[in-house]
Amino acid sequence: MGLGFRKSFKIAPGVRVNVSKRGVGVSAGVRGLRYSINSSGQRRTTASLPGTGISYTHTSGSGRKYKSSAQQQRQRLVQQQKEIAKQQELERARYEVEVYENKLDLIRSIHKECDDTFDWEEISRSTHPHQKNDKGQFKIEAQQELDSFQPTLFQKLLKTGGKKEEELRAAVIQARQKDAAECRELERTISIANRILNKDVDAYFEVIEELAPLDDLLEFGSGFEFFIEEPDALEVEFLVHSKNVVPTQIKTLTKTGKLSVKNMPKTKYFDIQQDYVCSCVIRIARDMFAILPFNTVTVHAMDEVLDTSTGRPNLVPILSVKFNKEKLNQLNFDAIDCSDAMINFEHRMDFKKTQGFKPVEKL
């Protein structure tokens, strides 16, 4: 508790000097009406009806008016600074709400993204001009630029046309080298395509590692492990980390544009969590079917769940889904509810609206 003091001195009938930590003030008046002013320039008028308890108080600032243009400009700048700070606060509030809403949209629409489909049969039949000792596209374009070169009048006067022509000849050599490198890369890709068509599991893993189709999910803290026992079937363990992804607060704007932050109800949190997990497993299956010739993709969503017997979190399966390629491709990904879509596939999920996910056994 802070210490304070106040002292009042009567200097004339109805006039008193008041001394306190805040400064010095003078008050004057009669019963029912008093007027006071303190050292900071604050003025107060108090009117009351004796014996009724009814009173009215009016407080004002110093009331001082500056005449110099510098002081007037200073007051305008101070007011402008306040307005700028207010607008920045409102803009920051809008930004935070937009980021919050965008995050919700992102974690509920992960399944809508998918890699382009690879046709390994077509890739295996690809050819490159270098394979027939023909000119590649880089060489053709560079040669055309060299053949059409005509020195300008300025280049003739400065005798720089020869230098430019040498640069174009060097560019033709570099283009030939780029065509050769492109040819080697295509031959490597064709080799991988043939290995995939021959169901070489090692080639499958090379493609997954090189294309890294799920890398954008790493932004959410997710992790993946891939298992292939048979060439037609893939098994994926997906580390959810939903506690790091799903927000625990709701951000909105008030009628005046200020930021309102409230704790998210558990039912809403668990609903978003379920949508996030189900959206991810669909996305994983779509990408795997797009880049490799699997018939089935089984995804196990793994997350930390509290073990009440030890009081410690354990990494356990909370959703296990076996996707069929043909059935998955029949879904309208822009319109589905990912959680409801699980009914289309063999799956295990124990989810309660008020409790969230419970551990399940893997398929």
Image (cartoon, rainbow, N blue to C red):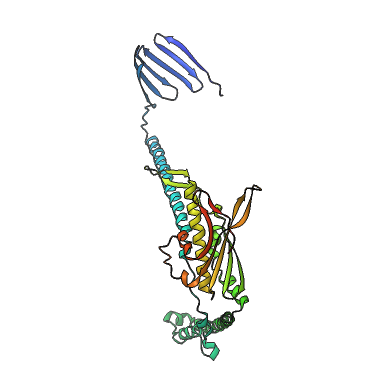
Q: Where is residue 133 drawn, in percent x and y?
A: 54, 91
109 or 356: nearer the viewer? 356
Please state if 13 lies on the left or on the right of 135 as rendered.
left
The residue lying furthest to the top in this view is: 13
Q: Is residue 157 above or below residue 357?
A: below
Among the 4 quarters of the image, the one containing residue 15:
top left
119 or 215: nearer the viewer? 119
Please state if 60 lies on the left or on the right of 225 as rendered.
left
Please state if 281 lies on the left or on the right of 98 as rendered.
right
Q: Where is residue 198 drawn, in percent x and y?
A: 59, 82
The residue lying furthest to the left in this view is: 49
51 or 25: nearer the viewer? 51
Total labels: the figure holds 0
Which quadrant of the figure contains the C terminus?
bottom right
Which quadrant of the figure contains the N terminus?
top right
The residue lying furthest to the right in this view is: 310
Among the 4 quarters of the image, the one containing residue 25:
top left
Q: Is residue 321 above or below residue 35?
A: below
Q: Where is residue 51 drawn, in percent x and y?
A: 35, 11
Q: Where is residue 18 drawn, in percent x and y?
A: 46, 16
